[in-house]
Amino acid sequence: MRLLSWNVAGLRAGPGPAGLGALGGDVICLQETRVTRDLLEEPLAMVDGYNSYFSFCRTRSGYSGVATFCKDSATPLAAEEGLSGLLARPGAGGAVGGYGDLGAFPPQELKALDSEGRAVITHHRIRTSAQQETTLTVINVYCPRADPQRPERATYQASFYRLLQGRAEALLRDGGHVVILGDINTSHRPIDHCEPGDPAFREHPGRRWLDGFLWAPEGAPGQGLFVDTFRLLHPSQPYAFTCWRIDTGARLTNYGTRLDYVLADRALALAELRDARILPEVPGSDHCPVLAELAATFLPAPRCPPLCTRHMPEFAGTQQKLSRFLVRVERGSGAAGGRGTSRGAGAGCSARKGRRPPRGQGDLLSYFRVARGQLGTGTAENAPGQGGQESDQNASGHGTPELAQDALGQRGQREPCNGPVPRELTIGQAAGTESSSTARWRAVLPGPAPPPCCPAHGEPCALRTVRKPGPNRGRRFYVCARPPGRPSDPRARCDFFRWAGDGRS
């Protein structure tokens, strides 16, 4: 069997039905789907060859959410949302069981932990490589992030970890096997992080929890009941990251963290695990898929459990779509042919884009005073109120506003990486090298000065803003525009830094 996990950072913009099929997983667990039930569309809910199970965030739209897609050959016996059992459905296949002792959690806390759509559990029948039939429970989980700016989220994450551990261990005690797939949102060891130099790295609460939850080979810390399948097969592989910052382009230099895991119970991993891999070549998200292959095989259930999207009224064929009652009317057919269509509206808009102002109405540039005897052949007599004649004269590149001269002379002395703009380049000359309207607007609104170049690469720097609380919050600064990376990587950014505006470094 092939079990796969992927944080897609939005299902509607993610892999799509074809992409899911290309992944080839028997069970595909997706996190951060960011869809609510009212936004779930049939092509995403009903993927050919799969039955799917969703959990939606109940507190915010477009936030969190997970979905599990099972091949028809791996149809589960039961499926439920959440970890607490509060969202389990009555009847056959509506509840997985194995809830353990939840007495340490107040009812309101359990409700809150299951309200963000962070877990789907499917319960399967399998046959092991020893030809023994047993069960496998797959927990698809999207663990919350501990936002350093919001202390309450650190508490929420710690409670979520405790609930996940309690449920997984309770399922193991009830018999069968358990696999946890998903975005755990914590990199476990220094080898799993691009910048592990902080002395307090090991003291992070999420890492301390993983230390106790996971089993490690003899001599290593951690004697829990579950195994990190990737590290079991690749204990010392460096730079095995699954998540990168998009805004810095860090994926190019593989400067990231490993947040995504396939965690199997110890007995299952030691007996059945055949492969565990990271798939960084798969694009589409700031995370990449991770997978584990087991020698065991699925035994499909005869029917899908109640949580399956096939049983939702909007997808079960019992509810007709409004579009079925509408007839498409093509342009040019009948009396309505020339109006009421999006194409007709678009054509009308495009026809108006190039329209000249009414006679006697000047454009905005005409309200700037023109300096007599400067900037080509423009004269002060070209001021507004001359029957719109300024439009024709300015169209040839003359009559550029005096305000633009001031702007260019004071703010427009740009120093690009190949040297400063020569002073002898006048606005009139610039207007002759590009379209007149573009040149005139560029002269009036020259824009910000170009950024400095980093000395190591001679390339324009990136302008960024300090976001962290402190005395420099809101200040802007320049850094090398290349993505972050290891010092030995020639593709990575250099250490250039300069405050914007005052030249401080």
Image (tube, rainbow, N blue to C red):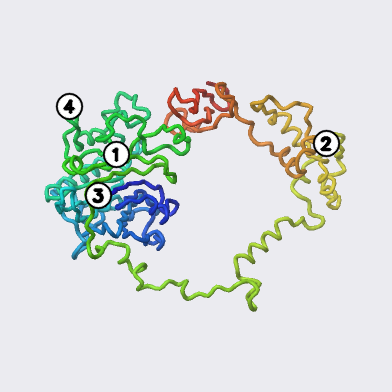
Could you tell whether 124 is left or right of 252 in the image? left
Q: Secondary structure at mark 2?
A: loop
> Could you tell me which residue is drawn at 31 percent across and 35 percent down?
187
Residue occupied by mark 4: 219
Q: Secondary structure at mark 4?
A: loop
Q: Nearer the viewer, mark 2 or mark 3?
A: 3
Give the quarter of the image for residue 241.
top left
Badge 2 amino acid: Ala
1 or 3: tag closer to the N-terminus? 3
Q: Nearer the viewer, mark 1 or mark 3?
A: 3
Q: Is residue 237 in view? A: yes
Badge 3 amino acid: Ile
Find the residue positioned furthest to the bottom: 334
Could you tell whether 123 is left or right of 378 in the image? left
**Between marks 1 and 4, how big is the CA–CA gap?**
30 Å
Q: Is residue 482 above or below residue 125?
A: above
**Between marks 2 and 1, how big is the CA–CA gap?**
64 Å
Badge 4 amino acid: Gly
Residue occupied by mark 3: 139
Horizontal and vertical percent position of residue 14: 43, 51
Front residue of this view, candidates 331 and 144: 331
Horizontal and vertical percent position of residue 34: 39, 52
Residue occupied by mark 1: 154
2 or 3: tag closer to the N-terminus? 3
**Between marks 2 and 4, how big is the CA–CA gap?**
84 Å
Q: Secondary structure at mark 3?
A: strand
Horizontal and vertical percent position of residue 343: 62, 65
Residue occupied by mark 2: 371
Is disc 4 surrounded by few (<14), some (14 to 19) or many (20+) residues within 10 Å? few
Front residue of this view, candidates 473 and 268: 268
The answer to whether marks 1 and 4 mark residues whose Cβ atoms lie closer than 8 Å is no
Q: Secondary structure at mark 1?
A: helix
